[in-house]
Amino acid sequence: MLSRLRLEYDGRGFAGWASQPGRRTVQDEVERALAVVLRVPGIAVTVAGRTDAGVHAWGQVASYVGPPARVESLNALLPDDVAVLSCAAVDDGFDARRSATSRAYCYRVLARRGREALERGRVLHWPFGVDSAALDACAAALVGTHDFTAFTPSESYHVRFEREVYAAFWRRDASGDVLSFWIEADAFMRGMNRVLVGTMLQVAGGRRSVEEFVGLLGGRPRAAAGPTAPAHGLHLVGVGYGGERVLRP
């Protein structure tokens, strides 16, 4: 029997999702709780998207071999910064990672002079000017299939650098202070979203043009793009299966 978990977590206290010797990870916490509830030692989970240290998740998906576990029992064993939202049986052959057809992320930016208090650790504070029209133009250019070599570390383990972006857009919240970049694609490379945001913010601040940004989508080297935005502004929104889209622009 296979089961599917949906969970959320605050990434600030973790060294990322994936298990690492001597470091606190989301995977270790989840597998530990499952082993106790299901009374199966050494249970292993497969995750849809391995988030880096400091990255948050609103709709992470994981799968494992075994019956569904009671959500309340799992949450009673998990720390306060991880919560299971659902756990259910799935069809044979389901794999949280390999069966995924899309993943969606949101990067949040607090664009005001005053620093954050309530949003500390969940947004990037950006006390500089922002050209919203330029950000919108950059996001619109991302939709489609492009070579994102410029947006992943040079020492990347990836062998394929083309990704298909299904949706990409910026939104401003009701306060007018928080800008959110939303993107959904078939898959993402290591650091891709954070480099995209770091480069787009350079465009928004007038340090490079929209045309320069668009030119990076043709397979330019990593050094041609902008800096990597901090991890704490990034959130995994959700995962699509069977061609279902997560984002509705």
Image (spheres, helix red, strand yellow):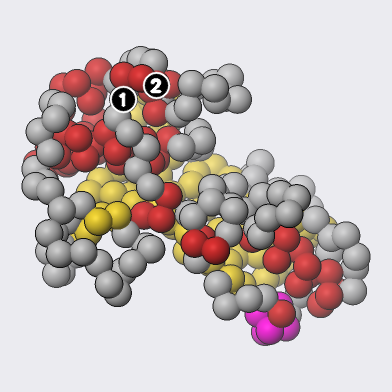
Q: Which residues are magenta?
A: 72-76
Q: Which amino acid is tagged 1?
A: Ala
Q: Main secondary structure of the magenta part?
A: helix
Tell me if 163 is positioned left or right of 214 in this view: right
Q: Is residue 72 above or below residue 131?
A: below
The stretch drawn in magenta includes residue 91: no
Question: Which residue is depicted at the point 46% across and 37% down?
Answer: 191
Residue 116 can be seen in this image = yes
Tell me if 135 is positioned left or right of 109 in this view: left
Q: Is residue 185 above or below residue 179?
A: above
> x%, y% of residue 169?
25, 46
> x%, y% of residue 35?
83, 69
Question: Which residue is depicted at the point 9% across and 47% down?
Answer: 129
Graded by Cα atoms within 10 Å as few (under 14), some (14 to 19) or many (20 or more), the crowding at tag 2 reads some
Q: Is residue 136 above or below residue 235?
A: above
> x%, y% of residue 66?
84, 64
Tell me if 139 is positioned left or right of 234 in this view: left
In the rendered view of the protein, which quadrant contains the N terminus? Answer: bottom right
- Give the residue pinned by disc 1: 225
Residue 63 can be seen in this image = no
Q: Which amino acid is tagged 2?
A: Arg
Residue 60 position by quadrant: bottom right
Q: Is residue 161 above or below residue 3?
A: above
Residue 222's disc is 2
Q: Secondary structure at mark 1?
A: loop
Q: Secondary structure at mark 2?
A: helix
Mark 2–mark 1 CB contact (< 8 Å): yes
Residue 101 position by quadrant: top right
